[in-house]
Amino acid sequence: MPEITSASGTGAMPETAFAAEGAPMSDRSFSVLGVFETPDALMKAIPKVRAAKLGTVEAYTPYAIHGIEEALGLRKSPLGGMVLVMGIIGALTALGFQYWISAIDYPIITGGKGAGSWEAFIPIMFEVTVLFATFTAGLGMLHLLNKLPFFGHPVLSSKSIKGITRDRYVLAVEAEDEAFDSAGAAMALRAAGAIEVEALPAPDRSPFLTSDNILRALGGIFVACLVAGLAMYFATKWFPLLKPMANMQDQPRLNAQKPSSFFKDGHGMQQPVAGTVARGHLPTATGTQDEAASLVNPLPRTKEVFALGKKVYTNRCEVCHGAVGTGVGSLTAAYGAKPANLQAQQFLDYPDGKIYWAVVNGKNAMPSHAPYLSEQERWAVVHYVRALQRAQNAKDEDLKVATR
Amino acid sequence: MSPNKNTSNLPSSWLWGAVALGALGVLGTYASAGPERFWANWILWFVLLFTLGLGSLFIVALEHLVNAKWSVPVRRIPERLATLLIPAVPVGLIALAALPVLYPGTRPEAAHHPILAGKAFWLSLPFFSVRTVIALALCILGLWVLVGGSLRQDTTKDPAFNFKARKFAPAFMAIFALVITLVAFDWLSGLTPEWYSDIFGVYVFAGAFLSGLAATSLSVLHLQDEGRLEGVKGDHLYNLGGFLFAFTVFWSYIGFAQYMLMWYANLPDEVIWYKVRLQGAWRLITIALASLHFVLPFFALVTRDAKKDPRRLRRVAYLMLGAHTLDIYWLIFPILGASPRFSWPELSFALFFLGGILLWIRGAMQKGEDMPAGDPFLREGLEFRL
């Protein structure tokens, strides 16, 4: 590949067609090439040709020549800055997407990590940074700075191209406006030591991304989506036994309350691993129920707490203890054991701590509910049981509060 | 750790004074602050001395391995810095006395520890000492072949050394990987033998290479200020700066990869090591380490011009040497307690060892040629352009 070094981006030159075969010197030539035999000769010629100020000076060489950028007075490429900015945007994009998904829109605690754990975001941020940066570097270099794609550069069909790819060093003076003095440029090049001079027409820079082409591309994508969507719709309608993607439906997942061949005991639902504590669930209180009697319910008696307690009671307690805590639930008949009647005097006299202890540790046939309830839910259901008891043994002043 | 701008004006007597004053403090540390504090400091400086010397030797070996020409004119600098491995030998042998004090694996009760019992032979005092002696001997071997050979070539002008070094370099890379992994595992992660990390050797390697690069860049800039190293241009500096830039990223990549896996797996034996470093004042030091060792140098060196700007490069090189010191401090000192220890014992050790290292480097920089005059590729290296 010949090294193409441009002193500045060349503007499009409309109305200039390719030179016809056998007519390399058109009267409206766009650039003039001067051929040199050695890189030293080229380097020595550059300041002289640039001093003539006839147009943009470019060099075409078989390989990179040290110092040629400085000699041609190339400006610093803006590519580095573009890549840095887009890399930072990539990092922030990845951070924003992940944070929004995992901490705001659909927070799920997995692996015991809190929602929005930044550590897990870093690898994705790294990858997206690299993706944005490399795309910017590649496309920015090719399209924005080198103005590719375009349909052909006259240098590629010049007489000098063979030399440029082999052992010749070419300097080009390119037109910057309509008043390009090609004869003057040829003279300047010869004066600087060029052994051959050649005039070329302007490159065909008719734009590639025209509105027509963009519309065609968008139309093609739209038609392809439409065809694929309709085909899928009718395929599933006409061939209902054909499952297009059964992997999601038939995955060997674990279902709560269902048997599973995965675990030894055949249950889909497992007790937590011994010695582990789920996030937000304090370790289960040890000690006896009498020792727990002194515990004080830390939650205030607010509407929210009672609502939470009611939810917990309905989901976990009602099947056995009944809707008002009388110990007659829908499951009672299925078991020999008789659930406690929470309205009995014994339980009316219980301090909060003892009820909490029973919820956490279980009692008699009742299993521990600690793995399923957060610390807040445990205490909220204690408040709710208290409310159930009070409702069955209401005093006069309660009525006044209710009617007020 | 290497001569800075002022040390050329700083008389050697001042450095000797610093060493003497530091030596008093070092002795005082042993007497009044206790052996644990003393040996923790000693190991900190042994590891710093060792990583600086071995990191520099790695730069030399890397040049021979890939047959690089650009670095021939500056190769004498890492060669001279690599001679720090010579004082590292006595410092390392003295450090063996720290084993029963700081290294739980060398104590007899380790045989009854559920985790350490399986590693008891490896961690035992005799085998630990033998490994250290072997590691130091291998370093001296590498130094003898690569640096000694290069110095002899100055007078013999025999190009055979280049072929010999090129053949030896791949073998040295294997030796290097073994030695740096042994030292990292034994001397640094051996302080907490229940904790284990596969990548730890690579992590220490990244720091060692960075410290070697930073010291090399600083010494090159310093010699240039004195009008030496004629012909070393911005293009050479650019390559040194590019290496520094790349390896700040490498260091953080390895460091974060190690952290993230342990954070995810959340295994008690592993996270405990990070837990102590992410609580209280150590948390601030961890954040400072990530900022000074990665964020700051990364953005300081990100542009093309910054990598060959002598002023910028000098500042970043100082920063990297400081950050590497902080890194090793962060690896060792949490064993002494939840609050970071830093007061007169640490300053005394810094005075003693920094003074000694600067005196050694200053002496090395005065000896012989500034460039490998006998290397047939010297001219090609001087003509290097980006």
Image: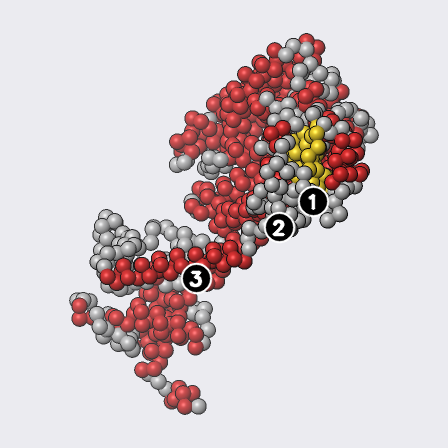
Dot in front, 1 or 3 = 1
Please tell me whether mark 3 sits on a helix, a strand or a loop. loop
Badge 1: how crowded within 10 Å, few (<14), some, or many (20+)?
some
Inspect the image, locate mark 3, and give the three-letter code of the amino acid beneath it: Tyr
Mark nearer the N terminus (2 vs 3): 2
Q: Position of residue A15 (x, y in %)?
A: 64, 50
User: Which residue position is annotated with label 2?
Assistant: A85
x, y (%) of residue B147? 64, 18
Label located before the other in sequence (2 or 1): 1
At 69% from the left and 19% from the top, the residue drawn is: B378
| Residue at horizontal 59 percent and vertical 22 percent from the top | B67
User: What amino acid type should be assigned to the residue bearing mark 1?
Assistant: Arg
Vertical arrangement, residue B212 with respect to residue A97, above or below: above
Q: Residue at x 49, y 49 (%)?
A: A124
Residue identifier under label 3: A106
Q: Nearer the viewer, residue B227 or B236?
A: B236
Asked if badge 1 and badge 3 are on a common chain, one would say yes
**How far, Cα to Cα, is label 2 from label 3?**
30 Å
From what the image shows, is residue A54 above or below residue A261? above
Q: Residues within 10 Å of mark 3 (few under 14, many from 20)?
A: few
Does B261 sit above or below residue B124?
below
On the rendered structure, is A371 left or right of B332? left
Give the residue number, with chain letter if any, for mark 1: A28
Left or right, B197 with respect to A201, comes to: left
